[in-house]
Image (cartoon, rainbow, N blue to C red):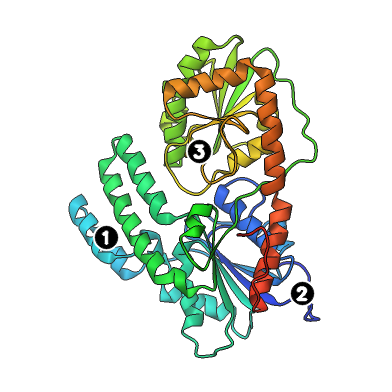
Amino acid sequence: MTRRGGPESGQGEKPRLLFICPILPAETGNGLAMRTGQFLEGVSRTFDVDLAVVLLSAESVTPNDFVLSKVRRCHVFSELVADTHYQFIDRVIDAEAKLAAFQAYGKPSICSLVTPALCEEIEKWIAGETYAVVHIMRLYLAPVAQIWLNRSSPAGPVLTLDCDENETTTHQSLAQCHRRMGNVPQAHWLEAEARAFEKLGQDWLGKFARVFFSCSDDASAHANARYVPNSSHIPANVSRLNSGAVRNVLFLGTLSYAPNTEAALWFAESVWPFVLQGAREPLKLWLVGPEPAETIQAFSGRDDIEVTGAVPDVARYYRTADLVVVPIRSGGGTRIKVVEAAAYGVPMVATTLGAGGLDLRHERDLLIADDAQAFAEACLHLLNDRALAESLVSRANRQVRRLYDRDSLAREIGDAVLSLARGEDAPSNIT
């Protein structure tokens, strides 16, 4: 499916860029879609963009107005078929034998869909096109770059890659999450995925002119890497909605994703009772996000907890929240929900991991706690001490406006990639 986007240049006003990603870029919603949208918004300022969406999930998508306004043309590659080796692994019934076969496979399972057949389809779609830059989102799509590495021409495109997060540490963390939830076989599988991602990174990261990460620590580990934080549109003015007699505590995220499921369960079961016990006013916990797991849905029907499922606009929930909690205990990258909460002027309590990778500090911008009792006490501190909450919110809001404004970062992304295309590496806040 190919869709035409905005008007073609025709005058050679901008260089050309091919943007390859695993999800439809977006301004809101899923974190990966927002990160992809942030990069698309950035490069579309300085390039004429062709967008190839390599859909690695079974869902179907249609390019939206946001995407079509940013690109010259767009094609969705869907209904991908795994390579024959992985199809064999998938048919193995015995769990131990299946794991052993996967370990011998040596690639992340998601890479089974990045096949020579897919590369051939992409090559057909771009036949006759010349690009100054090819930008790829996520490490697992890096092997698509073989299309250009196989060519002998020295004047090929500059290759750039946004890893977003460190897939190795993310999968190690996910393995620990599943161990805590009692799913040991899945933990073993995720540990094998982590080792496969480590090898994939060793094989591919050095082949790109520039690699980007959303966490500064991940970027500092590679000579050709730069740090580009996640961002959010920062509202110019936020009108807070009166929450009424009951004060609202908000947890937001895709509730089928294991780290979010674990976090919501831990907060609701281990922290929330202490918060209710110490509160001076009636409280309600809102668990907001698509695809809530059955363990999350089980809270539905309680007077003190509301499970919403997917909502059309998260802004309303931020505007009515008296407190945002980010009790994340596993996962990787950085959490856009933390930036969003600060942008909307909501006080926050987060775990160390929940606030990780962002320049937001304990007792300056938010409160950080890692065990249940300390987390509950921090929540009560902000709910009961409005002066403290307002001072933290004020500083956090200034910080995200300075560092994590999407419009500002999009401009820097566009300028940085254009500098690479010109053979420069101009200084910017992208470090």
Q: Which of the labelled discs sits on residue 354, or is there none?
A: 3
User: Residue at the location (71% across, 77% down)?
Assistant: 15
The answer to which of marks 1 and 2 sits earlier in the sequence is: 2
Q: Are marks 1 and 3 in contact (CB under 8 Å)?
A: no
Question: Circle 3 sits in a helix, a strand or a loop, which is it?
Answer: loop
Q: Which of the labelled discs sits on residue 8, or is there none?
A: 2
Please provide percent x and percent y for residue 353.
47, 39
From the viewer's perspective, is 260 left or right of 187? right
Please provide percent x and percent y for residue 424.
66, 75
From the viewer's perspective, is 191 left or right of 14? left
Q: CA separation, marks 1 and 2?
A: 45 Å
Vertical comparison of 409 with 416: above or below: above
Q: CA separation, marks 3 and 2?
A: 42 Å
Q: Which residue is mark 1?
A: 102
The answer to which of marks 3 and 2 sits earlier in the sequence is: 2
User: Residue at the location (62% across, 86% down)?
Assistant: 128
User: Residue at the location (64% across, 14% down)?
Assistant: 246
Front residue of 228/79: it is 228
Location of residue 198 by image quarter: bottom left
User: Residue at the location (65% across, 23% down)?
Assistant: 322
The answer to which of marks 1 and 3 sits earlier in the sequence is: 1
Residue 299 visible? The answer is no
Please provide percent x and percent y for residue 190.
33, 50
Front residue of 198/40: it is 198
